[in-house]
């Protein structure tokens, strides 16, 4: 990390403790310091600043007589962490503010390892350092590509759950590319050679997760989170509920193909005559959308049970929500510039799909294709976001009569719900009732924008956003759940409302 300027350091102090900033009035014991450093390293990195009182943010400073000891404690703590934590810069730095010296340990963003101190994997959550549970450790390991989910035995799966015809079809694609096909003598040997089957401790051959997802008769029976949910909304936020919803199941190839069918069904296509030919102008480049779908099914984190890929088609954009975080070494900025390195979370699935024509011919350059295709159509480039998942957004061009095709030919006419329209005259609704409905709709719009930007909303956050009571907030949020616009996650106290 570059050296902090005095202005940046003051800004960090003024902002108080956060998930990436921690203050200490004086250096703690090495084992406690190791826990703090470990927690920050297992999160997003950050700074531990010694010489600041955390409650008052008063600059106390580190006396000269304790300067060497303070730095030594930090370095000893780094060596107690497994694997050994390397700071950036490698030595704690000294800063002087208001005539007082501060010591700053800069923890770099995590590049893959899962750190532990005193035999515990710690993580920084908000302003606290907490031990990770086993499920959380497995989730983090999967997010960083440290586990081989693909090669693990599929849950309650046996060789009868594999469709031999699908294997034969795959081998027919592969035969022209591989000299190894002929050496397999049986279905079991084929699947073992492809890492689509494994041998248990009892010597039994069973399908792996990759085998079930690629060749299974009913993949979602064993891997329910592999289904894909596609939803068409009539407005920009989904408040009016969905117009069309489809849950897609099947093998990896079938998932990709059926998502494409759903998108093509609803993409509006305009046309105009150029010379003697009719030229079609769809709202979105289908090749770019298909590439984003292929990336999603290949790169998603399949260890996240209860989380599926979701495709949301709004009136002004298409969003593809992909469970899991970016692998270490890949950033949002790299994706948006089309310069992200080619790293695969699911290498076995990628190798299998690459052998099937029409799916992964552009391995490693798919994002560049998305950017190029949108640019050629005069559309904004795809936008990438990372929250608890990775989201790619494709936007339509702003409506302009000057740029509209002469002959607009919609594939399917969708009725757009009105969010603020008056109720029909004579409906029996009073003026005050209409005003109340408008206010409620406005609150829901604020809430949905909040969820779109931050990934979720709680009852407390809804109240702070809209100024309503707890019961009103609960009623509004539950109505959005009933419409299928939001779903509930977590228990009563930690309940969150997320996109479905």
Image (spheres, rainbow, N blue to C red):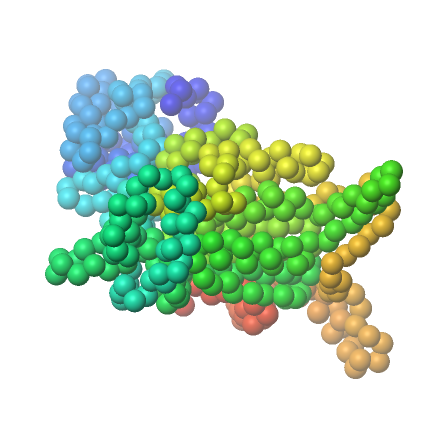
| Residue 368 appears in the rendering | yes
Q: Position of residue 375 (x, y in %)?
A: 67, 34
Position of 32 compared to 88: left or right?
left
Q: Position of residue 467 (x, y in %)?
A: 59, 60
Q: Position of residue 368 (x, y in %)?
A: 55, 33
Q: Residue at x 39, y 44 (%)?
A: 175
Q: Residue at x 42, y 44 (%)?
A: 355
Q: Kindly indicate the quadrant of the structure image that contains residue 214.
A: bottom left
Image quadrant in which the N terminus is located: top left
Residue 403 vertical position relative to residue 496 in the rendered view, above or below:
above
Q: Position of residue 432 (x, y in %)?
A: 76, 73
Q: State the residue in front, 10 or 382.
A: 382
Q: State the residue in front, 386 or 450.
A: 386
Q: Residue at x 27, y 21 (%)?
A: 90
Q: How many marks?
A: 0
Residue 481 vertical position relative to residue 178 in the rendered view, above or below:
below
Residue 208 vertical position relative to residue 340 in the rendered view, above or below:
below
Position of 183 compared to 57: left or right?
left
């Amino acid at each position: 990390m570059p050296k902090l300027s005095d202005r940046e350091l003051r800004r960090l102090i003024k902002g108080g403790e956060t998930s990436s900033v921690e203050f200490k009035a004086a250096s703690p014991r090495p084992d406690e310091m190791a826990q703090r450093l470990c927690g920050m390293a297992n999160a997003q990195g950050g700074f531990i600043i010694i010489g600041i009182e955390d409650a008052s943010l008063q600059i106390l400073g580190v006396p000269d007589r304790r300067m060497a000891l303070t730095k030594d404690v930090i370095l000893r703590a780094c060596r107690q962490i497994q694997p050994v934590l390397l700071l950036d810069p490698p030595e704690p730095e000294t800063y002087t503010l208001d005539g007082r010296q501060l010591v700053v340990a800069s923890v770099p963003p995590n590049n893959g390892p899962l750190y532990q101190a005193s035999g515990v994997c710690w993580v920084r959550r908000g302003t606290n350092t907490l031990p990770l549970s086993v499920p959380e450790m497995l989730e983090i390991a999967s997010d960083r590509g440290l586990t081989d989910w693909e090669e693990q035995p599929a849950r309650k799966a046996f060789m009868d759950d594999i469709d031999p015809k699908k294997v034969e079809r795959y081998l027919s694609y592969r035969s022209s590319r591989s000299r190894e096909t002929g050496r397999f003598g049986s279905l079991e040997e084929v699947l073992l050679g492809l890492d689509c089957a494994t041998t248990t401790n009892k010597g039994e051959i069973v399908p792996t997760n990759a085998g079930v997802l690629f060749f299974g008769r009913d993949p979602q029976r064993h891997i329910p989170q592999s289904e894909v949910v596609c939803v068409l909304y009539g407005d920009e936020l989904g408040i009016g509920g969905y117009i069309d919803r489809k849950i897609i199941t099947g093998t990896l190839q079938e998932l990709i193909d059926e998502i494409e069918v759903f998108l093509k069904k609803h993409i509006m296509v305009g046309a105009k005559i150029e010379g003697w030919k009719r030229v079609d102008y769809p709202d979105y480049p289908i090749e770019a959308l298909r590439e984003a779908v292929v990336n999603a099914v290949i790169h998603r984190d399949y260890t996240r049970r209860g989380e599926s890929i979701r495709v949301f088609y709004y009136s002004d954009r298409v969003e593809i929500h992909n469970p899991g975080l970016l692998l270490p070494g890949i950033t949002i900025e790299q994706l948006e510039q089309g310069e992200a390195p080619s790293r695969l979370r699911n290498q076995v699935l990628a190798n299998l799909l690459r052998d099937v024509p029409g799916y992964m011919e552009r391995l490693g350059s798919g994002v560049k294709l998305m950017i190029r295709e949108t640019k050629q159509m005069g559309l904004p480039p795809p936008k990438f976001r990372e929250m608890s998942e990775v989201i790619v957004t494709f936007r339509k061009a702003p409506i302009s009569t000057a740029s509209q095709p002469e002959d607009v030919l919609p594939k399917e006419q969708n009725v757009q719900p009105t969010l603020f329209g008056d109720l029909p005259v004579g409906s029996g609704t009073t003026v005050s009732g209409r005003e109340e409905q408008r206010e409620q709709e406005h609150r829901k719009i604020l809430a949905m924008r909040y969820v779109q930007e931050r990934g979720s909303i709680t009852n407390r956050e809804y109240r702070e956003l809209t100024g309503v009571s707890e019961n009103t907030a609960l009623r509004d949020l539950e109505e959005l759940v009933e419409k299928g616009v939001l779903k509930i996650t977590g228990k009563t106290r930690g309940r969150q409302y997320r996109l479905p």
